[in-house]
Amino acid sequence: MVPHLTHSGARPYHRGILRNLRPSVTGAATLAVAAALALMLASCATAPKAPPAVTGAPAQPAPANVLEPAALPEQPIIAAEIGVEPMHPGPPPEPPVELATGGDPDSVTNATLQLRSEYGDLWTRIRQGFILDDLDTPSVKNAEDWYAARPDYIARMVARSRRYLYHIVVEVEKRGMPLEVALLPMIESAYNPMAYSRSRASGIWQFIPSTGKLFGMEQNWWFDERRDVIAATDGALDYLQKLHAEFGDWYLALAAYNCGEGTVRRAIAANRKRGLPTDYLSLKLPAETRGYVPKLQAVKNIVRDPERYDLTLGDMPDAPYFAVVRTKKKMDVKVAAEFAEMPLDEFLSLNPQHNRPVIAGADETTILLPYDKAELFAAKLDLSDQPMVTWQAYKFRAGETLQQVAVRFGLPLETLRTVNGIGPRAKVPVGHALLVPSQVTSAATVASLKNAVFTTVPSGRALYHRVRKGETLASIAARYDVSTQDLKGWNAGHTAKIIPGQRLRVVSDVGQVRGKKSKRGSKTRVLSAKPAAGKGGDRTKPASAPASRPRHHTAQR
């Protein structure tokens, strides 16, 4: 069965602000449009590279008595193996329909969709959804001062959030959660999907591997769904709802999201034993967690009244930025960006989950595209019958070196290591599958990827972990992303019953974390990463930021 590509029920924006209307094309007109599109894209059907642009005459404004989209019969555009999942609509539009101004004049949006000049403001929608009682503490004031003194930092964070914030707001509202939650990635990662901590917390919601898997985020050699905006948002909201169901208080749920539910449980039990209150402000929590909710309050205050802090948030249209595309075809990341006529870095900012230069690793792939690029992408993908993968599997041979493989396939050694996730000190075993450029793109290239088993090459670094009170083999294994069986094998005869102070040998790619220890774990910091907005060298959080390391809790806590 061939799925359909539709834009029903969505109100998009991207550059020009889109309305959820598109001209209804029927009968002979449909054939004419299809024929014209086929002629314009004929050259891209023979090779996956450099697909030509699709142009068209601007759509005419709709007449005053035009029907709302719900009353128009849907005319799906059929695209082989592709389906676009519409985003959830906002409030019904009221302003008159008119063509958008600005943006790319050759964009498929301006050629096929009717646009409206403005939408409601997403900031207003968020403010109206604030329901938590405000905190007024010195910690809140300190965080406000820190943010107010860094307008450039705020501007970069807001610019990154534009791609994802509408989707998160819709998902939070669907669950009946306070819209303060939509601001949480500003504290966790500054809305940087590539944020990564020493404890391997990743993505805008900062999940460590074990917790990500627990909440449905697949992580394999090809991709990591902790960086997938949709999958990670679903997981984060599931987890926050679980915490709220346990503690019955959103501030306690937020604290547990930061430091782990076990830490909050123990703090509540300690206060109850002493006959003390058990609200967030009354609990004895780690220093970082005591500052976590105040930072969220500070961001909330800035969103509510940015002028008070001499800050400007800019316009944020209350409309979806991206459409969801699903396809079973395998392709290079670069080819996908070219089909969507997007710069590679912009494509990756919406699809940061891919670890390799090839979109593969699953039977069906989810791709996020700016709303006005989805139909263009689908049309080109449908018309291209050539292989779109320029990489192949290569089996490492006995007596061979990585340098020799790199020279053979025309790659710098560092690029070969990066593409395959091989560290500088890692030793590649004989028979290990490597991803290398293909000399001739063909169906056999794609088949080689399907038949090969790609695995990570461990660095093999050995370290020793000193057991702390309350830790178990399972919690230690989760911390270092290894199995309990591995721990038992490395410590034969010493794991029947572990005790505080005991030293355990661990072999892991996750290094031992330095810094002041707490009962729940160790301090981490966000490592340098390029922001999704493409501003090179920006750190997720400068060293002088009020401490709020990404969470690295596990479900056992």
Image (cartoon, rainbow, N blue to C red):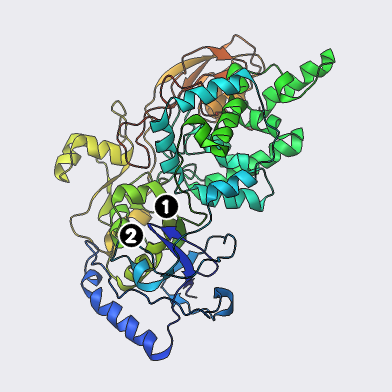
Query: Which quadrant of the structure image shows residue 268?
Result: top right
The residue furthest top is 501
Residue 463 x, y percent position in the rendering: 45, 17
Q: Earlier in the sequence, mark 1 or mark 2?
A: 2
The residue furthest bottom is 28
Comparing 379 with 67, the one in front is 67
Comparing 9 with 60, the one in front is 60
Give the vertical position of 417 relative to 231 (above or below): above
The crowding category of the residue bearing disc 1, from other C-alpha atoms within 10 Å (few below 14, some 14 to 19, many at least 20), is some
Q: Quadrant of the C terminus?
A: top right
The crowding category of the residue bearing disc 2, from other C-alpha atoms within 10 Å (few below 14, some 14 to 19, many at least 20), is few
The numbered mark at residue 402 is: none
The residue pinned by badge 1 equals: 361
The residue pinned by badge 2 equals: 102
Left or right: where 94 falls relative to 77: right
Residue 221 x, y percent position in the rendering: 41, 43
